[in-house]
Image: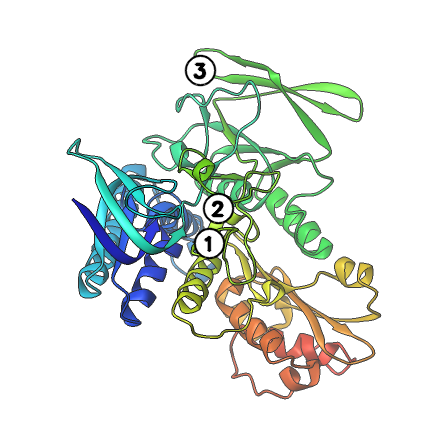
Amino acid sequence: MAREYDLVILGGGTGGYVAAIRASQLGLKTAIVEKEKIGGTCLHKGCIPSKAMLRSAEVFSLTKKGEEFGVLTSGIELNFKKVQDRKAAIVEQLYNGVQYLMKQGKIDIYNGFGRILGPSIFSPIPGTISVEMADGTENEMLIPKNVIIATGSRPSTLPNLDIDGTHVLTSDEALEMQELPNSIIIIGGGVIGIEWASMLADFGVNVTVIEYADRIIPGEDEDISKELTRLLQIKGIKIVTNAKVLSETMEKEEEKVLIKAEIAGKEQVFSAEKLLVSVGRKANSENIGLQNTEIELLKNGAIKVNSSFQTKESHIYAIGDVIGGLQLAHVASHEGIKAVEHIAGINHDSIIYDNIPKCIYSSPEVASVGFTEKNAKEYGFQVKIGKFPFKAVGKALVQGETEGFVKIVADEKTNDILGIHMIGPHVTDMISEAGLARVLDATPWEIGNTIHPHPTLSEAIGEAALAVDGLSIHI
């Protein structure tokens, strides 16, 4: 029997379930089709489990430095099984919370794989959803007035690199490792690759990062990239840039993987126990029935949408990783909210993506919002820069984490803040102030004259803002 809904959402990840909650608040009868578990990649294979493991790595690393704080420790050992158990418990607790939210919102969940059908006896326009149920029961037919595609993404790989889960891994398989390798090669020095490099190095693994670009985290400000490279190398991580991995040369032996990379015209061989492929993520736009619609895809396989997240089929929307752009959980959530509000006839402003904070949970952490110095100059701005190091912040000395700095890029003509970039302790928690500054079109003077409590790490933001005009106090 076909079931009717105001809205059916394909995919129950962060974007999908947040959209469903907002739809429920607005009185829309809503269903989610999810082939695995509500919470999606972020909860089960990405944000949460990886950050849980990063925290364990941070505690392990800090404990070994206990003597610096007057805490005498000996015989420190890592129990990786407990690391995995703690990760699993956190994921399970949050998973139970999301399930409760679905029940509270009276949102129907179909555990299966959904496909969009073309015009049929059920509807004269594309959008009927056929659900192949995971438990093998008879397919369900859902007839929605509107659809949101929130099918997310999956790890990309390189040609000739067979992901076997033993020697060659993506982040999905790495999260399930039961034992740590002695050594690992990470292909890709972007956000995910660097988080894994930092984590594994803190766990005591010998790490080599191979990056095609001329620097790691190439999307971040060059000063941040340079500082992160320096600090990761102090950890013992080997970082190789301007390197083209020759994936066809990979060889597997019983206890190691060998692969070649072309660097400055010469081939170099790298070997390690495991190889982690971290070269971005690919939109999950295949096999969901798009061929039955007029929906257009971009060259990278992402779904093309307008500023309200409508596809070419105006009643079918798409959000999150499947539309490309900033592939971040908090972005997908807000896109989902905006799409639902458009469905409900609520006018809204378009998302300004340059105002969205980005975070890297390595050690040290990296966070940013807005234009890099290079981007700002390329857009024609005349910039002025303010920088302030954490080594001049009392709380950073108290914490024993003095590396890094805050950098503010401002427009010399208008004094508007163009970008704020941070590397150092807990900057992923501090970046929201910078995000608010961008949303409110603040100036460095306004941040500098906002009283930041002492002693806190946030003082670095206020001092960096003052430094834009040469007025910082403590340096």
Q: Secondary structure at mark 1?
A: loop
Q: Secondary structure at mark 2?
A: helix
Q: Is residue 262 above or below residue 461?
A: above
Q: Which residue is mark 3?
A: 255
In percent of the image, x 63 and y 67: which residue is there? 391
Residue 442 or residue 395, whichever sits in front:
442
Q: Which residue is mark 1?
A: 319
In percent of the image, x 55 and y 76: which residue is there? 436
Q: Is residue 436 above or below residue 286?
A: below
Residue density around tag 3, few if under 14, some if 14–19, many if 20 or more, within 10 Å: few
Query: What amino acid does circle 3 point to?
Result: Glu
- Residue 168 makes an appearance in the image: yes
Q: Is residue 151 left or right of residue 437?
A: left
Q: Quadrant of the N terminus?
A: top left
x, y (%) of residue 426?
50, 63
Residue density around tag 2, few if under 14, some if 14–19, many if 20 or more, within 10 Å: many
Query: What amino acid does circle 2 point to?
Result: Val
x, y (%) of residue 249?
61, 14
Q: Which residue is mark 2?
A: 322
Residue density around tag 1, few if under 14, some if 14–19, many if 20 or more, within 10 Å: many
